Image (cartoon, grey):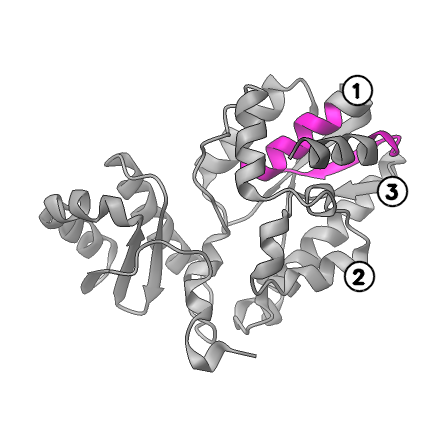
Amino acid sequence: MLNKLKQLENDLRGMKRVLVAFSGGVDSTFVLHESAKALGRDSVLAVIAESPTYPVEEIKEAIEIADKLGVKCRQIKTEEFSDENFVSNSKERCYYCKKELFTKLKMMAKEAGIEHVLDGSNADDLNDFRPGTRAKQEFGIISPLQAAGLTKADIRELSKTAGLPTWDKPSMACLASRIPYGQRIDEGILGMVGAGEKYLRSLGLKQLRVRHHNNIARIEVEKEAVGQVMGMMEAIVKKFEDLGYIYVTLDLKGYRTGSLNEGPENIS
């Protein structure tokens, strides 16, 4: 792992100034931290994208983290909802979302005289279905963690050593990833999902997802938290019914990334 870290540091030192696509998550926080360490804080710009696909509290936390790291931070609003390719929610949804984001980031970088735009993709991401990778390649976005072979486990351990507050933060992904392909994305659905996940976190649950299947909420939590959920079943059902769901289910397979890609109809 230390060899991977050394490669990351060497790669970053070869860049004069960088713009980091920053979400405040485990990976992008580590990229921001390492970039500031390698290049100096004044040579790093963190950019946070505001969108209905990300909870407001996540954006607020990202701003606070960038401030603590002493890095310049800017916010932009993305407009993926104006693209029917995104709203119609095909299997390529992530490509169109990332295309919108990277278009804006590259424009910002050009205006600021910054050559390199970085994201927080890690080595584990290569094992998942991620159409956004195509947009990343088209726009020349650099993934330094991935290039160095750093996995999520590596990044958590190194973040802990560096004293970063995100080292044990649960993995987060855009709320649109909770909606099955083919079902149109709208802000109302995203609001239901976001409110449901926020409520579950308020109960002390950490790594979780609320998958939206029309009037059914499929809740994923880590397997060791299943008993905790069952002990609060009545309150959870009441909350989700208040949000508009008729049926509330607990997925016995537990939390896992990309579970909406599992059906045979979703295999390329």
Cα–Cα gap, marks 3 and 2: 16 Å
Type of the residue with mark 1? Gly
Which of marks 2 and 3 precedes in the sequence?
A: 3
Q: Are marks 2 and 1 in contact (CB under 8 Å)?
A: no
230 in magenta: no
Q: Where residue 211 sits in the image (x, y, percent)?
A: 35, 60
Using the rendered view, name the quadrant where residue 79 is placed: bottom right
On residue 110, the disc is 3
| Of 52 and 72, the residue lying toward us | 72
Q: In the figure, 129 relative to 238: above or below?
A: below
Type of the residue with mark 2? Glu
Q: Which residue is mark 2?
A: 138
* Range drawn in magenta: 13-36
On residue 40, the disc is 1
**Whether residue 160 can be seen here:** yes
Which of marks 1 and 2 precedes in the sequence?
A: 1
Write the residue at 80% across / 61% down. Answer: 138
**Whether residue 74 can be seen here:** no
Q: In the figure, 185 relative to 18: above or below?
A: below
Q: Is residue 85 left or right of residue 199?
A: right
